[in-house]
Image (cartoon, helix red, strand yellow):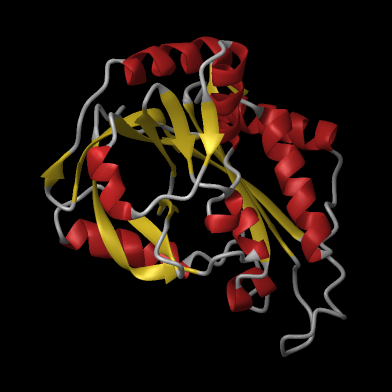
Amino acid sequence: MVPIVDRGFLYGDGLFETMRVSQGRPVWWSRHLERLKHGADYLKLALPWSADELQRFATKLIEQNALPESILRIMLTRGSGSRGYSPKDANCPTLAMTLHPLPPASSATRLVTASLRITANDPLASFKTVNKLLQVLARAEAEARGANEALLLNTDGNVAEAAASNLFWLSNGAVCTPPVADGALAGVTRGVVLEICRARNIPAKEQSLRPEELLRTDGVFVTNSVAGIVPVSELDGIALNQSPFVAELQAALESAST
């Protein structure tokens, strides 16, 4: 049991990683663990087990649940401590793993621009903290407006990311995505897509973009570790251009993930 005084429950004082399980193994495991460790170092959280031990736990969880195609979530919190914000007495971290059925694949997603904004140049935006209230409210707003996902802008008015995905667009033969400084999470799949482009000599760059410029791109897609690459069909009810190159990237990502 997780006690009610766990700081993850009280303050969102913790981190998480979500990854796809394919053929019984977590995809891009080492990259997810590296980000988890990087976030733990930043928050001064101790990982109670080594990466090898965590991988053994994950393998056992997958085998016992007989879910070779699924979603694995790892959650690390600071654990319990004294009442109040100070973490000085919280010396026993909580770590939990959960496994979930893989949802049906999505052929396309519809975005609406959320009214809430991400803070530009926020160092915490680089980590998957368990405090995701802004993303929760943005997704709820999107669903209330008949969309699948929310587009998040930052406080400078630039595109940052989607609520649960990184955002890419195609422009003049280049694959583009917002820089981390604009509020984009350094997503694992985002990083793999950029590496695929560089390996194939496809121009790829990080750049800031105003949301209205997405309507003039050659195509838009989102990425995350569960769904991979998903084309965006419309933004705020306006149809976006569709590019066959997105399907080529999907195939390349699938090949790299096996």
Side (left or right) of 19 relative to 240: right
Q: Quadrant of the N terminus?
A: bottom right
Kindly tell me whether residue 258 is visible in this rendering. Answer: no
Q: For the view shown, which residue lies furthest in the bottom direction?
A: 84
Q: Quadrant of the C terminus?
A: top right
Q: Is residue 186 above or below residue 40?
A: above
Side (left or right) of 131 relative to 8: left
Question: x, y (%) of residue 94?
Answer: 74, 60
Question: x, y (%) of residue 17?
Answer: 61, 45
Q: For the view shown, which residue lies furthest in the front direction?
A: 172
Instruction: Say which quarter of the image contains residue 91.
Output: bottom right
Side (left or right) of 14 relative to 235: right
Foreground residue among 18 and 210: 210
Q: Is residue 179 above or below residue 224?
A: below
For the point 85% across and 45% down, the residue is 49
Foreground residue among 122 and 224: 122
Q: Is residue 200 above or below residue 81?
A: above
For the point 68% across and 27% down, the residue is 59
For the point 29% across and 44% down, the residue is 214
Question: x, y (%) of residue 3?
Answer: 66, 72
The image shows a total of numbered marks equal to 0
Q: Is residue 200 above or below residue 161?
A: above
Foreground residue among 34 and 246: 246
Kindly tell me whether residue 220 is visible in this rendering. Answer: yes
Question: x, y (%) of residue 57?
Answer: 73, 35
For the point 27% across and 59% down, the residue is 113
